[in-house]
Image (cartoon, rainbow, N blue to C red):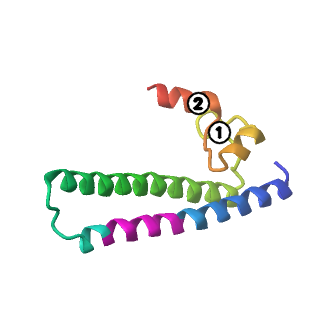
């Protein structure tokens, strides 16, 4: 992969990481504020709704944290000159895949095999 392409992907990853860090912080703030500031619900359905919303926010945070880890790993691969190579089979990951998922560590075939079990 060309050095200019690597720099472009690195910049995209840094922007995405900054945005996700802000999103995770905002979700955490909302989830914690709702649990700290909420008054005791009058009806059990309200309690269930609040619990669902908090669980949903925590699940979203966990998913975004996983993406942040994948982004950091991709940035590390850029620094090591390994970015764009599949960690499963060592083949080249197509630029179209990297444009869609810049933190992709595997080619489509290896990713499908991993997800399939």
Label located before the other in sequence (1 or 2): 1
Query: Residue 61, percent across and down?
Result: 42, 58
The answer to whether 103 appears left or right of 43 in the picture is right
Magenta region, residue range: 21-33
Query: Residue 64, percent across and down?
Result: 48, 55
Tag of residue 110: 2
Q: Is residue 68 above or below residue 115?
A: below
Magenta-drawn stretch, dominant element (helix, strand or loop): helix
The answer to whether 31 appears left or right of 90 in the picture is left
Question: SS at mark 2?
Answer: helix
Residue lying at 26% horizontally and 74% vertically, measured from the top left: 37
Query: Residue 90, percent across and down?
Result: 66, 37
Q: Front-most of 54 and 49?
A: 49
Residue lying at 78% horizontally and 61% vertically, measured from the top left: 7
Does the segment drawn in magenta span residue 8? no
The answer to whether 68 appears left or right of 4 in the picture is left
Q: Residues within 10 Å of mark 2 (few under 14, many from 20)?
A: some
Q: Quadrant of residue 100?
A: top right
Residue lying at 26% horizontally and 52% vertically, measured from the top left: 49
Residue lying at 71% horizontally and 59% vertically, measured from the top left: 12
Q: Residues within 10 Å of mark 1 (few under 14, many from 20)?
A: many
Does the segment drawn in magenta span residue 27? yes
Q: Quadrant of residue 112?
A: top right
Residue at mark 1: 86
Between the residue at mark 1 and the residue at mark 2, the CA separation in whole angstroms equals 8 Å
Q: Front-most of 72 and 22?
A: 22
Dots 1, 2 in contact, CB < 8 A: yes
Query: Residue 84, percent across and down?
Result: 71, 45
The answer to whether 34 appears left or right of 65 in the picture is left
Point out the residue furthest to the front here.
Answer: 42
| Quarter of the image with the C terminus in it | top left
């Amino acid at each position: 992969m060309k050095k200019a392409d690597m720099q472009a992907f690195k910049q995209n990853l840094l922007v995405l990481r900054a945005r996700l860090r802000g999103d995770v912080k905002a979700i955490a703030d909302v989830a914690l504020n709702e649990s700290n500031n909420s008054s005791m619900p009058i009806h059990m359905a309200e309690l269930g709704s609040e619990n669902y919303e908090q669980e949903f926010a925590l699940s979203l945070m966990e998913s975004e944290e996983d993406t942040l880890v994948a982004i950091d790993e991709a940035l590390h691969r850029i620094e090591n000159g390994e970015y764009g190579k599949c960690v499963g089979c060592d083949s080249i990951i197509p630029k179209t895949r990297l444009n869609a998922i810049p933190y992709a560590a595997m080619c489509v075939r290896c990713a499908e095999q991993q997800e399939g079990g």
